[in-house]
Image: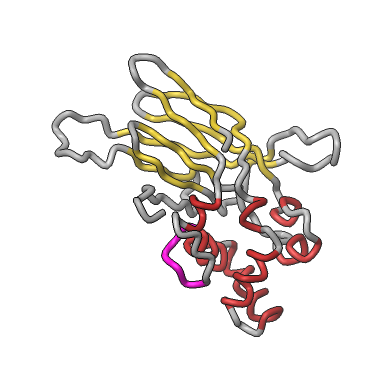
Amino acid sequence: KGTLTADFGNGFDVTFSSLTAVDWFGTGLNTNYGANNLANRWFSAALASNGGKLGYLVETEFGGNVAAAFNFFLNHKGFQRLSDPNIAYVHKIGSAVNFGLAGHQNAGQVFDNPALQQLFAGIHASEVFAITYKGDTSYGYSFDEPFTSGVVNAKDGFSHNGTFDFTLVTLDNPELPEPSAAIALMAVGGGLVALKKRSNNE
């Protein structure tokens, strides 16, 4: 599991991590459609994103069988491919941390499998990250349209051509009761972002 820690001094540090199977499917590695885990939450959010475009494709390609679409994505290693985010920058501004993920303007280009490339063509989706601050770990992603980065990977000519921008807002207020629910996460522009603290079952 890869990690990157931004240490701003005075005990203020934030750690970004790639995801493992346990992050996606919980300690029991429950890969079933409908399970209470990150994989199912992400997939449900993906269906509703981009004006419901992916949901429409599930209707046309899978006859509306969402479970079949989920299993198709799982079996073609879709979750695995989304598990290795690339942090482009990290800035601390007051009580907030602004950071960006290097990604793709076209989510179809994220995937190696031609079937997933076709399914996600023209859809905006970032890779998924874990972020830890003061012992609390949360997961984030965005389906907003990314900013044009102005750079590409020299090997393929398109990777990293989009940047997804996020802000971590810390609530370090001594007057707040404990636990303080110390972090909130948002995508700049109001995009869809999942925030889920890791529990013992996940």
Look at 36% across and 22% down and name the residue there: 12
- In percent of width and height, residue 11 lies at 34, 19
> How many badges with numbers are in the image?
0
- Boundaries of the magenta span: 33-38
Query: Is 79 located above or below residue 165 in the figure?
Result: below
Is 183 magenta? The answer is: no
Describe residue 120's horizontal placement relative to residue 114 as left or right: left
- In percent of width and height, residue 31 lies at 54, 65
- In percent of width and height, residue 128 lies at 56, 47
Look at 41% across and 54% down and name the residue there: 202
- Which quadrant of the structure image shows residue 136? top left
Is 34 magenta? The answer is: yes
Query: Is 27 located above or below residue 12 in the figure?
Result: below
Look at 43% across and 29% down and name the residue there: 14
Describe residue 38's horizontal placement relative to residue 94 as left or right: right
- In percent of width and height, residue 49 lies at 55, 63
